[in-house]
Amino acid sequence: MQSDIEFVTWFRSVTPHIHTSRGKIFVIAFGGEVVVNGKFVELVQDFNLLASLGIQLVLVHGARPQIESRLQADQQEISYVQGMRVTDVTTLQYVKEAVGKVRVEIEALLSMGLPNSPMANAAIRVASGNFVTARPIGVLEGVDLQYTGEVRRINAAAILDQLKQGVVVLLSPLGYSPTGEIFNLTVENTAAEVAIALRADKLIFLVDTPGIQQQTESGNTLLQELTVRQGKALLAAMDTAADQPNEDIRLYLPWALHACEQGVERVHLISRHADGALLLELFTHGGIGSMITRDPLQIIRQADIKDIGAILQLIEPLENTGILVRRGRELLEMEIERFTVIEHDNVIIACAALYPFPDDKACELACVAVHPAYRKAGMGRILIDHLEEQARKQGYRHIFVLTTRTAHWFVERGFSETTPDQLPQSKQHLYNYQRRSKVFVKSI
């Protein structure tokens, strides 16, 4: 029975994420290391699962280790400039050979439906093509990179046409010039420009680390959410840091920021080593890696009628334990303009109401509730500080609260205990002496 309840709870928790993802375009980029590490079969299952949920997928693969292996086997010279391979005529032949082999292997796995897997007999169609027009990078640091190129243009219309037909589009790190030349591209450049051209909802990079990490006194801390501004500051700090960051972050973070600035809503960097990391990042609220957005995900705003269901979910457990006075849906609908909420990534995680008493220059703070997952993150303090500032701007001098179970919490935030007869006259008439709530007040 307990496992059944846990399953139902889990299924309900992921359903909103599935609903909002259906029909969206996700660009997923991964290096050739993913194909050779023995875990690619599991990742293909996840790709098939995403496609079956109605998500439009564009996969961009790399082939660096496969190219390295072929060059080393034939004792060919290997040279890099700023993390990019110097691709001469000979090296280009190895690049084409390795990229073609990797692409065919990926297409085969995506097409077979994987018997005895969760996606057995899934009919996933795959399309590849000359969707990327490229140009040579030219000379860097005095070195001619020759057939190493960068994206010039993406044939977005052709890719979108495939996606609308339910086809998974697979792109290799090769680009073609109008004169028929072939250029070796980086997977990060290709994926970012494809995501921008398609106005993708998500760009996802599978990287070596759990995500973007920041050095602290207690060790490396995973940064689960960053804005573009924070990401740029982090890059600047990397340039002056004594310890060099992971190479993958150096390669992918600048392109992640570029994609966000050019209209991609969210960019994710997640570990290629964790089984199911893709699903955990996309279908759990906290995710498992690092997510970059142009603007902050968390906002404080006035509640409106569409928030009533979410507010009820927050306050009902507290009403059931007697911490809050019970409010019905009808009362909430009548008083919704009194409520302020904190919204994080489209989920209401905290709420509070402010009731004015203009004649007494006072406001009542009521119905303070925070989602259990965020109670140690200071959301209650942030919300109260915001409401105090709003009340102060409107000319109120005092804010008071009635509580039965959270007295110490309010005392820690500058409230002082008083007596019910110090309440505004109109509020005194409504005071419930059976409930015997303690009264706390704070000058603002």
Image (cartoon, rainbow, N blue to C red):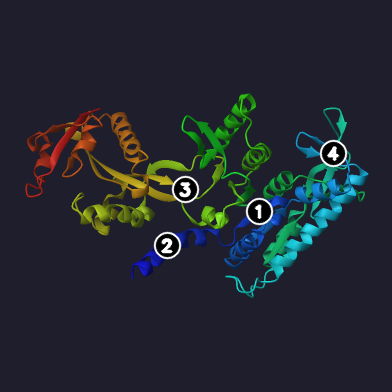
Q: Are marks 4 and 3 in contact (CB under 8 Å)?
A: no
Q: Which mark is residue 27?
A: 1
Quarter-of-image position of residue 118: bottom right
Residue assigned mark 2: 10
For mark 1, give the secondary structure.
Answer: strand
Q: What's under tag 2, amino acid-wise?
A: Trp
Dot 4 or dot 1: first in sequence order is 1
For mark 3, give the secondary structure.
Answer: loop
For mark 2, give the secondary structure.
Answer: helix
- Nearer to me, 68 or 228: 68
Q: Which mark is residue 86?
A: 4
In-image side of 307 versus 71 (left or right): left
Residue displayed at 35% across by 40% down: 379
Residue assigned mark 3: 345
Q: What's under tag 3, amino acid-wise?
A: Asp
Dot 2 or dot 4: first in sequence order is 2
In-image side of 74 versus 23 (left or right): right
Q: Are marks 1 and 3 in contact (CB under 8 Å)?
A: no
Residue 241 vertical placement versus 420 (above, below): above
* Crowd band around label 1 with a 10 angstrom C-alpha radius: few (<14), some (14–19), many (20+): many
- Front disc: 2 or 1: 2
For mark 4, give the secondary structure.
Answer: loop
- Front disc: 2 or 4: 4
Q: Which mark is residue 298?
A: none
Tell me the CA gap for discs 4 and 1: 27 Å
